[in-house]
Amino acid sequence: MRLSELIAPTFYGVHADMRAGRHEEYFLKGGRGSAKSSFAAIELLLHLLRHPEENAIVYRRVAGTLRSSVFEQLLWAVERMGMAALFDTRLDPPELILRSTGQRVLFRGADDAGKSKSLKLARGAFGFLWFEEAAEFGGMEDVRTIKASVLRGVNRAATVFTYNPPASASSWINAEAMLEKPGRLVHHSCYTQLPPQWLGRSFIAEAEALRESNERAYRHMYLGEVTGTGGQVFDNLSLKAVQDEELEGADRWMNGLDFGFAADPDAFIRVAFDARRRRLFVAEEFVGVRTPTDRLAAEVARRARGETVRCDSADPRMIQELRSRGVAAVGARKGPGSVREGIRWLQELREIVIDPARCPHAAREFSAYEYESDGLGGFRTDCPDRDNHLIDAARYALEEQIQRRSARTIRRSQLGI
């Protein structure tokens, strides 16, 4: 058996990583026909061979979908790897048993995540946990409940998530995949990275037909892109790696701070503005809930580098506290219509660039910020006042630029231009 004939080249690096046990969580996302589930099935079987004392378990959101999906996927992998004679198969509930060692592959639904607490193994422990169609799960709380119940008795287990990213950036799994966490590897694949003969002419023709008729649907369904629902506020957002050299062309550096109240976080942002190209770079961030004043001042001062920090003027006491600790804090002027005007200014930029590795909270917030549905298939025109703390901080930081544009607009209106 040659693994290179079973695993698509795009997964070679992930395969090497899993073989070496470098990460504990693997987010394998992508479009239709990207071979992510086939790869996960093969890696599950390889894991059993490498660790004869460990078992594996596979979850879907609804138990009734197991037999026709992920169970069949594992049977395919067993057959393709020439291991059919090595396994016993049970159908109700679905289960695979490796005869030589007694290792088991169990299949369960997460209809009630709490039921995982009653799972028992006569031999060994679970060392491989796979969430198929992970976007269908209720959220990371359900995932954590299952992991805490299943992954016991092993020093290091592999947890794999396979899924097609939902269109909306506000989806829990899209937001989770943006977070840089130790022990986590995120991989994206699509059908264009596979040998064409693996897919067949009909599959490729169907994908190309959709690309011609509805490019947004094609990008979401086949390329696995988070295209948005059509209601995203910032169509000019680019999430990509940013090198220090790209920031050198900025005309100005500006800082903003939105104060948190109750469960809302304090949110600081530092942006670089390239006025000639109309590009805004989000360069640094700090987000903290109920941050002690001394720590908040230290975090902001370190990032602002002695420059002015425009803050939420609703809390003048906190502004004074920051000033007494050496932060050049001033209150933003705000005023009627300032929110709408600030959002419009940001929307009219050529590009808002955020590096998810540098600023994961800003990347998640800007990409997930969407207009609310009007219930009739359209969207309300007002921007929602929630989950927008760094966006508010950016408006404060850019207040002078925004008001300068607003003044020019008023002057032209008065002149009848």
Image: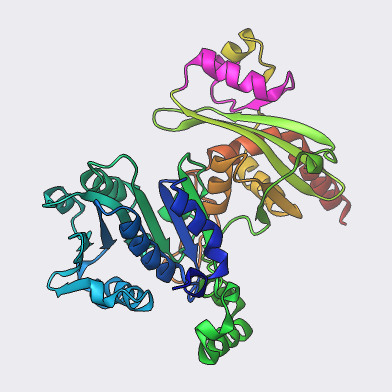
| Quarter residue 100 falls in | bottom left
Q: Which residue ends up furthest to the top in the rendered image?
A: 324
Q: Is residue 290 something that shows in the picture?
A: yes
Task: Give the number of callouts.
Answer: 0
Quarter of the picture holding the N terminus: bottom left
Residue 305 lies, with reference to residue 399, above or below; the image says: above
Instruction: Say left or right for 260 vs 321.
Output: left
| Residue ID at (37%, 74%) | 81
What quarter of the picture does the C terminus occupy?
bottom right
Where's residue 198, x and y in %? Answer: 51, 82
* Residue 16: percent from left, percent from top: 51, 55
- In the figure, is residue 118 to the left or right of 85? left
- Residue at 60% x, 29% y is 257
Which region shows up in magenta?
291-319
In this picture the colour scheme is rainbow
- 121 falls in the magenta region: no
Instruction: Using residue 298 as the reference point, say whether residue 264 is left or right of it.
Output: left
Please tell me which residue is depicted at 33% across the width and 64% down the height of the picture: 45
Q: Position of residue 284 (x, y in %)?
A: 65, 34
Q: Is residue 159 above or below residue 251?
A: below
On whether residue 293 falls in the magenta region, the answer is: yes
Residue pictured at 69% horizontal, 17% vertical: 328
> Quadrant of the rendered structure where residue 85 is?
bottom left
Look at the image and tell me whether residue 175 can be seen: no
- Please state the horizontal and vertical placement of residue 184, each as a whole percent of the image: 46, 46
Q: Nearer the viewer, residue 56 or 257?
A: 56
Q: Nearer the viewer, residue 177 or 183?
A: 183
Residue situated in front as seen by the camera: 89 or 339: 89
